[in-house]
Image: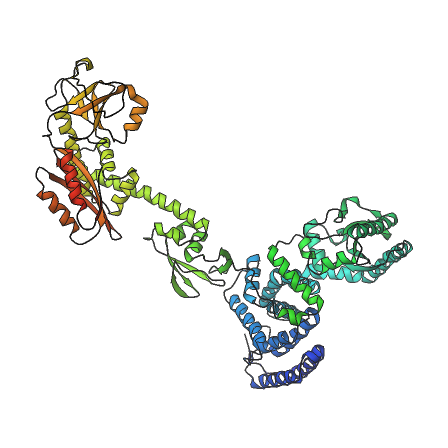
Amino acid sequence: MEETLITTDIERKKINELKEQLFNLLGDTFSEEDKGVISKLLTERIESGELKRNVFELNPVLMGLQTAILAVQEEGMGRDGVLAIILYCMDCHTHINDNVERIIHGLHRIQELYKKNPVIESENFRNLLLSFAEDMRVILIMIADRVNLMREIRDTLNKEAQQRVSEEASYLYAPLAHKLGLYKLKSELEDLSLKYLEHDAYYMIRSKLNETKKSRDEYIEKFIKPVEQRLKEAGLHFHMKGRTKSIHSIWQKMKKQQCGFEGIYDLFAIRIIIETEKNDNNSTEHALCWQAYSIVTDMYQPNPKRLRDWLSVPKSNGYESLHITVLGPEQKWVEVQIRTERMDEVAERGLAAHWRYKGVKSESSIDEWLGSIRSALEAGDSIQMMNDFRMDLYEDEVYVFTPKGDLKKFPRGATVLDFAYHIHSNVGNKCTGARINGKVVSFRHTLQSGDQVEIMTANNQTPKQDWLNIVKTSRAKSKIRLALKETQVKDGIFAKEMLERRMKNRKIELEEAVMNILIKKLGFKEARDFYKQLAEGVLDPNTVIERYQQLQDESKSSANDQRHETRSAEEFVLQDSQEELLSYSNDDVLVIDKNLKGVDYQLARCCRPIYGDDVFGFVTINGGIKIHRTDCPNAPELRRRFGYRIVRARWSGKGTSKYSVTLRVIGNDDIGIVNNITSIISKEEKIMMRSINIDSNDGLFSGNLVVNVEDTSRIEALIKKLRTVKGVKQVIRI
């Protein structure tokens, strides 16, 4: 538990010592005024008793000063960063300047992220952390703070908290330090994490290293000395570094190679850095490296399987070096790296840093950006350059939390609905909204980085067509389309079964052929669209059944009235005509008259010709003739495929029969417009309205009128009158 801070005398003395050490490190960059402000704030906060110890019972003032010193010594932190560290650790709200304010704001924002219980073992969380920092000094401060904390929790009794911060150091802060080229801090974080998380492994390796430290140092010196002599004799200018791998690195190799400590044969690593002139070209540098390589391998037996030639073919990130493992004195394997100063500078400054050629994945944009940070640190101009750094890497991405703390990445502009479909199709299909940071929002709400999203669902919710305009990701769009298609199929089956059930209750026989004609008459190209509107209630089932009955009755009546005794086609009554209705090779004309006997003919159902229409005859397989309008939709195909079975035809006498005609009417959905239309039809002589079906949507109406007429002249006159009705935009015969 957190306890109210009571600063002990020992702590007070330590605070004063650290304060003076910090002032000395900063030198002239820290003015007397700055020193006075900090000294006053430290005294006030210590005496107030308002500060609290953390879960490890550590003093926040001491921790802040230690972190500030570490940041100055290892990261080149300047005045504003130091002031931000001290003010933040003491929870002070004193305004110094905008830079300090921005750094403190970034630190607070990141602490807010931690309250969401994030899963830290992910690249997404590291990226979110960077995007939230705004100022890169925030990340540098957090790395320094974590190193300092890891140093101080060695003897804590709170092992659970110790394990948690150690895991964060291993998964989060060590990789960040690695990316920034802060190799010393990175190695310390890894070693301390191993110490707390895998105690036995850490102390076993440390013990073995300690046992051999003296002999190891002697061995490195023994290896280097003759090599130095031979290189000097060859006229090379160089310097050499000898090192032992870190405990964490050794442990990783032991696990990877599944061997014991003694099985790690490249504990020793020697780096030969050749000094060159600035104007030396690459070929000259390569030649010097190969010369050094030749000298080393002449002295010690190389392992050819361990040769890594990144001179001839540099790595894709620009890294150049020669690596070889040789069998040194006492039959011990030693790794030797050979490179020039330029190559070493490139590798060390982050342009092709060690973490990248080790295979750690990262985005190219962040590689370049973090490399520039490292360059600024090493160049010593961090004060000026750090002020200009802003995070603009993720302008096209947002990172959001699940309730369990998992991080998900989405394109900017993604909505709650995208998040829901990312989790699962069923969650997306049932989504009604979400709770974001405890606040209820609609599923149209746009996600922001750092949001913690909890999806709300309802069993009666189903996907809608307009959802496709709400989501941003292709994954969500494809899932919505699939759900809509499945829903349409289910609704269509339900609607068809419902219609069949109602027709059966009314003892009406369902004929698929008649139903298909009705569907086309109603203006639908696909049966599924018809059943979809029926399921959605756009079409009234009772009206559909009535229309079906009318069509069925007309079909039977037409078949009875128009079917006559069949005779040979040679006995057709033919009449010459100057008027060509169709360009056929056969000049015979079939004259259609109600008194025509002995000819088996029918009026085609696909186009429903009436007296006065331009028509032609089509001889069917059984010898009968179907009469089609010349503008029938099927006419082009019949002419193309069966031109030899087409005969010219015309009407004879005067139209006295009643023909059923369907008119398609479209217009503005104004009050009384339907009454105006029906009123005109009722006043027409010899025209009887059989049915009307109107559908209104978005201020427009469309519908089908079925009327009985004697000939085309009357239907054309009716169409002209209907087009004069105010609000009517289109009237066509179908």
**Is residue 19 left or right of 284 when viewed as pictured?**
left
| Up-down relation of residue 87 to residue 373 (above or below) | below
- Identify the coloring: rainbow
**Who's the residue at 57% across and 61% down the image?**
126
Q: Position of 410 compared to 260: left or right?
A: left
Residue 25 visible in the picture: yes
Camera sees residue 122: no
Can you give x and y, in whole percent of width and height, for residue 45 in the image?
58, 83
* Residue 289 spot, x, y in % from top left: 81, 51
Q: Nearer the viewer, residue 34 or 388?
A: 388
| Number of numbered discs on residues | 0
Left/right placement of residue 274 relative to residue 651 reads: right
Q: Is residue 461 above or below residue 598?
A: below
Quadrant location, the N terminus: bottom right
Give percent across and percent down for residue 304: 79, 44
Screen quadrant of the C terminus: top left
On the image, which quarter does residue 166 sit in?
Answer: bottom right
Q: Please state which of residues 357 and 350 is positioned toward the viewer in this rendering.
A: 350
Relative to the observer, which residue lies in front, 127 or 654? Answer: 654
Residue pushed farthest front? 578
Q: 151 or 324: which is nearer to us?
A: 324
**In the picture shown, does residue 76 fall above or below 643?**
below
Question: Residue 135: x and y, percent?
Answer: 58, 68
